[in-house]
Image: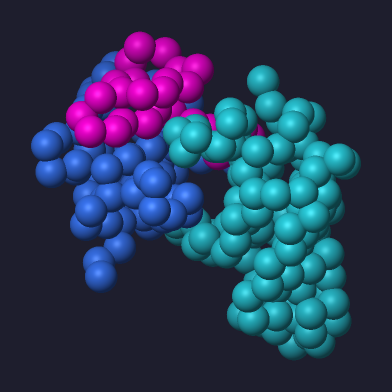
Chain colours: A blue, B cyan
C-alpha cells in the first residue's frame, strides 16, 4: 500500500513569487491536513480538508490556501512568498472512523530567497 | 489554545540505556499521538493513546497516558542507534472526533551513542 506522497521534495523560490505543493494521500483516505515546520515555531497546523471541504484552519494569513480534489489529492498554495515562509511543509492523511492514526508524507522543503 | 511541553528538549544516551520523554498538556488530552522524525523528513507514527491510564508498546517503546496529570510519557528500553531522531507528541485539541487538527510539542532530540 503506497504511503502519502508529496511533490516536489525540494523547492527554491524568490520572494514575491507563489508556489503550489501537492499531496497524494493513502488510497481510501479522505482527510488531508497540512502543517508547516520551522526550527523556531515547530510544527504548526495550516488547514485540513475532508471530502473536498476545508474543515479546519489554523492561524495563518490568507496567503496560504489549499484545496482538495474529488480523488482526495490536495494542493496548498502560498502567494507572495516571504523569507519567513521557508519551511518544511508536511501533509498527513487519515481515514476517519476506521483508524485514528494520521500518516505523514516526507514533506516539501521550501526555501525562499 | 492548547500547548504541549516536551522534556527534555534533547537527550544523549549510551546505547543500551533506558530513557523517558515526557509530554505535558496545558489542557485536557482527548487523544495523544507520538511520532518520530528523522531530520528534515516526514513523521513516522508510533502510537496513539486515547484513554487515561492507557499504555501501549511497540517493540522497545512504551507510551503511557496519565489523563489526570494531562501528561504522557514515552519510554525506550535498551536504546539502540536506530532510535535516534526527534520525538514529537501531538494532541487533538477537540473531543477526539477525528478532525486531525493536531497541536504538537517542540520535540525531543534523541542521540544514541554506540
x, y (%) of residue A85? 42, 28
x, y (%) of residue A36? 46, 36
In the image: residue A95, left or right of residue B85: left
In the image: residue B3, left or right of residue A17: right
Residue B14 showing in the rendered view? no
Magenta segment, principal secondary structure? strand
Quadrant (top left, top right, bottom left, bottom right) of the N terminus of chain B: top right
Q: Is residue A43 magenta?
A: yes
Between B99 and B60, the one nearer to me in the picture: B99
Residue visible at 59% across and 31% down in the picture = B95
Residue visible at 79% across and 30% down in the picture = B26
Kindly indicate the quadrant of the structure image that contains residue B82.
bottom right
Kindly indicate the quadrant of the structure image that contains residue A71.
top left
Residue visible at 60% across and 61% down in the picture = B47
x, y (%) of residue B98? 47, 38
Q: Is residue B43 magenta?
A: no
x, y (%) of residue A57? 42, 21
Task: Report the magenta residues as a range.
Answer: A40-65
Q: Is residue B33 above or below residue A18?
A: below
Looking at the image, the residue that sits furthest to the left is A70
Q: Is residue B41 above or below residue B98?
A: below
Quadrant (top left, top right, bottom left, bottom right) of the C terminus of chain B: bottom right
Q: Is residue B39 above or below residue B112?
A: above
Residue visible at 68% across and 42% down in the picture = B106
Amino acid at each position: 500500500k503506497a504511503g502519502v506522497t508529496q511533490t516536489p521534495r525540494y523547492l527554491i523560490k524568490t520572494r514575491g513569487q507563489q508556489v503550489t505543493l501537492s499531496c497524494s494521500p493513502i488510497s481510501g483516505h479522505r482527510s488531508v491536513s497540512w502543517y508547516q515546520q520551522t526550527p523556531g515555531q515547530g510544527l504548526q497546523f495550516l488547514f485540513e480538508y475532508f471530502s473536498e471541504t476545508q474543515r479546519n484552519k489554523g492561524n495563518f494569513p490568507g496567503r496560504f490556501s489549499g484545496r482538495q480534489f474529488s480523488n482526495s489529492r490536495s494542493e496548498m498554495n502560498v502567494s507572495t512568498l516571504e523569507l519567513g515562509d521557508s519551511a518544511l511543509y508536511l501533509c498527513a492523511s487519515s481515514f476517519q472512523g476506521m483508524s485514528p492514526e494520521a500518516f505523514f508524507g516526507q514533506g516539501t522543503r521550501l526555501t525562499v530567497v | 489554545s492548547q500547548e504541549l511541553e516536551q522534556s527534555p528538549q534533547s537527550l544523549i544516551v549510551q546505547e543500551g540505556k533506558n530513557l523517558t520523554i515526557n509530554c505535558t498538556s496545558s489542557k485536557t488530552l482527548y487523544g495523544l499521538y507520538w511520532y518520530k522524525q528523522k531530520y528534515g523528513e516526514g513523521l513516522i507514527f508510533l502510537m496513539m493513546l486515547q484513554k487515561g491510564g492507557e499504555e501501549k508498546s511497540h517493540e522497545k517503546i512504551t507510551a503511557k497516558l496519565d489523563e489526570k496529570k494531562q501528561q504522557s510519557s514515552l519510554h525506550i528500553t535498551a536504546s539502540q542507534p536506530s532510535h535516534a531522531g526527534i520525538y514529537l507528541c501531538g494532541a487533538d485539541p477537540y473531543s477526539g472526533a477525528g478532525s486531525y487538527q493536531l497541536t504538537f510539542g517542540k520535540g525531543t532530540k534523541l542521540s544514541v551513542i554506540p
